Image: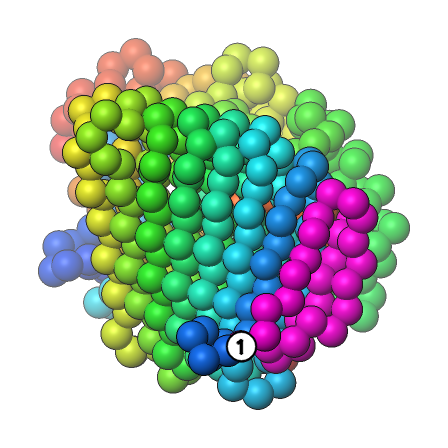
């Protein structure tokens, strides 16, 4: 397993094989922000742990070459981050991302370029928000038969407020594309949350779906758990854990890491 | 000996009267069946006993032994030993059966909880109910067939070891073979624990396996006729309306 550990806006530790090349790009007069460029040459798995000990800005660029598969787990936690991700996918490449965030505030821009015919981007993102978090996702289907499956699940708590703006674009003549969006926020606070899903499609031969839901856990779910003897707080915690860990394609070790993180938050 | 005593219970939801001066007493060792047409308040009764906050008790009392349940929360009622097997068990996103059952047992048994005993009992009960072993690792009720959902309710009952059980249309969604398995498993638990059971059902077929001592017909939120198990055959032969008219 390839691993990259980022602390604030610097690479702290790298453990890589030949399937990945990583370049650190120091901030300059044009970017003002440190960046990391990750080039994926062969099929591989990658784990990124991103720790923010202070308010941090960072750019991360991931390029996946033609016919290459990348499975990425990103676990991000700590202080507020302002971060930009840019993904460039070549022909028939596959990128599977499972991402978990637990920061004290986030402003994030994700730009996904499906540049090669047949490229697929499967993205599952979970966050616990106790401060303001804004996510702007732009998915460009730049070639035919490209696929994007995007899942954003946020748990909003305390002083949190989550805004998700997501736009999938399929231009004219890019046929056979699939664009799916699944956005859901469980709001445990009284603060306002927003989901703005957009599908900008200029071609008829496409498959596109979006769902957006903001709400709380249902009374029926709580009743079911309480009818088995779970006190209200325990029932809520079990539902929270289920919501945050469901759908993620992660192994037992990674699940245990995220479970520990969730448990620490609600201790 | 435990007694569930419902006295003159009147319940509404959204200003609509669902239970109307309903009374019933169930003792350990007794099996009661409530039958009646759709929309007559049978499922509401089960949820009100369990403390579903959707329903408002306007009048009357529910006692379990000497404890007044009216003001207890659902989980407090469950921890007294009352179990409701639901008509439509819910999917719990991301919560596996293993996590669900282990946590429930932890709460019930506290420091007496023994993981080895839990696993052993879980395996035995899964086998008893002819369920697939992977059910433990699946998300609670997600992509379960109707039969699997109902068997899963009985699995929970067996592990939680309640002393008063309410089964709300536990027969719906079960094929003939599964119905026999569920019926036999409930009866095995009944003989083992000598507990009180309240069955809510539309059909006689469940009562071929779980033999009630008392059968009640419920119409418009109250019991209009009670009898022994022979009443079931009369309902099958004549329907509810004729029996009620005879009664009037």
B216 lies left or right of B174: left
Q: Residue at x 66, y 34 (%)?
A: B135
Magenta stretch: includes residue A253: no
Residue A75 seen in render: no
Task: Give the prevailing secondary structure in the magenta stretch.
Answer: strand
Q: Bin the neighbour count of mark 1 within 10 Å (Cα to Cα): few under 14, some 14-19, many 20 and up.
A: some
A36 lies left or right of A88: right
Question: Which percent across, then down, holds residue A119?
Answer: 47, 32
- Disc 1, SS: loop
Q: Is residue A206 above or below residue A14?
A: above
Q: Residue at x 61, y 79 (%)?
A: A8
Q: Is residue A171 above or below residue A105?
A: above
Question: Which percent across, then down, holds residue A161?
Answer: 34, 75
Q: Residue furthest left?
A: B15
Question: Which percent across, then down, holds residue A172?
Answer: 20, 30
Q: Residue furthest bottom?
A: A54
Quadrant of residue B56 within the rendered picture: bottom left
Q: Residue at x 74, y 43 (%)?
A: A19
Q: Is residue A94 above or below residue A10?
A: above
Q: Nearer the viewer, residue A219 or B178?
A: A219
Question: Which percent across, then down, holds residue B213?
Answer: 51, 34
Quadrant of residue A238 within the rendered picture: bottom right
Residue extent of the magenta highlight: A1-27
Q: Say which residue label 1 marks.
A: A27
Chain to which the residue tagged by mark 1 belongs: A
Give the number of callouts.
Answer: 1
Q: Nearer the viewer, residue B23 or A24?
A: A24
């Amino acid at each position: 397993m390839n691993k990259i550990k980022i602390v604030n806006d610097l690479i702290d530790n790298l453990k890589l094989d030949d399937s990945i090349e990583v370049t650190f790009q120091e901030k300059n007069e044009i970017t003002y922000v440190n960046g990391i460029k990750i080039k994926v040459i062969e099929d591989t798995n990658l784990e990124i742990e991103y720790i923010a000990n202070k308010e941090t800005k960072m750019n991360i660029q991931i390029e996946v070459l033609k016919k290459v598969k990348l499975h990425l787990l990103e676990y991000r936690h700590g202080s507020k981050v302002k971060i930009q991700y840019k993904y460039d996918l070549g022909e028939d490449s596959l990128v599977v991302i499972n991402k978990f965030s637990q920061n004290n505030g986030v402003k994030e821009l994700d730009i996904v370029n499906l540049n090669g015919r047949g490229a697929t981007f499967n993205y599952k993102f979970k966050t616990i928000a106790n401060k303001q978090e804004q996510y702007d996702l732009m998915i460009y289907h730049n070639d035919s038969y490209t696929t994007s499956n995007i899942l954003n699940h946020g748990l909003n708590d305390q002083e949190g407020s989550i805004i998700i703006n997501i736009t999938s674009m399929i231009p004219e003549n890019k046929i056979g594309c699939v664009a799916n969006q699944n956005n859901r926020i469980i709001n445990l606070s009284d603060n306002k949350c927003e989901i703005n899903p957009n599908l900008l499609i200029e071609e008829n031969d496409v498959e596109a779906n979006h769902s957006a839901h903001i709400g709380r856990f249902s009374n029926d779910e709580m009743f079911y758990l309480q009818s088995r003897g779970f006190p209200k707080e325990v029932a809520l915690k079990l539902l929270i854990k289920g919501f945050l860990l469901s759908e993620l394609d992660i192994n037992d070790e990674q699940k245990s890491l995220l479970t520990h993180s969730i448990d620490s938050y609600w201790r | 000996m435990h007694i569930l005593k419902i006295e003159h219970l009147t319940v509404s939801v959204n200003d609509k009267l669902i239970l109307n001066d309903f009374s019933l007493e169930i003792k350990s060792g007794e099996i009661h069946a409530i039958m009646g047409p759709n929309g007559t308040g049978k499922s509401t009764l089960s949820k009100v006993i369990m403390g579903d906050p959707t329903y408002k008790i306007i009048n009357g009392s529910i006692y379990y032994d000497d404890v007044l349940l009216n003001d207890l929360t659902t989980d407090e009622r469950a921890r007294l030993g009352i179990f409701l097997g639901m008509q439509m068990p819910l999917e719990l996103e991301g919560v596996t059966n293993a996590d669900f059952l282990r946590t429930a047992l932890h709460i019930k048994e506290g420091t007496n909880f023994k993981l080895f005993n839990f696993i052993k009992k879980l395996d035995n009960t899964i086998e008893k109910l002819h369920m697939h072993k992977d059910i433990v690792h699946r998300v609670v009720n997600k992509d379960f067939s109707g039969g699997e959902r109902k068997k899963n309710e009985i699995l929970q009952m067996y592990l939680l070891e309640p002393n008063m059980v309410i089964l709300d249309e536990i027969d719906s969604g079960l094929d003939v073979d599964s119905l026999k398995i569920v019926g036999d498993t409930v009866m095995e638990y009944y003989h083992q624990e000598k507990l009180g059971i309240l069955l809510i059902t539309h059909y006689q077929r469940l009562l071929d396996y779980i033999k009630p001592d008392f059968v009640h017909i419920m119409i418009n939120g109250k019991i209009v006729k009670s009898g022994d198990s022979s009443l079931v055959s009369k309902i099958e032969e004549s329907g509810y309306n004729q029996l009620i008219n005879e009664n009037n």
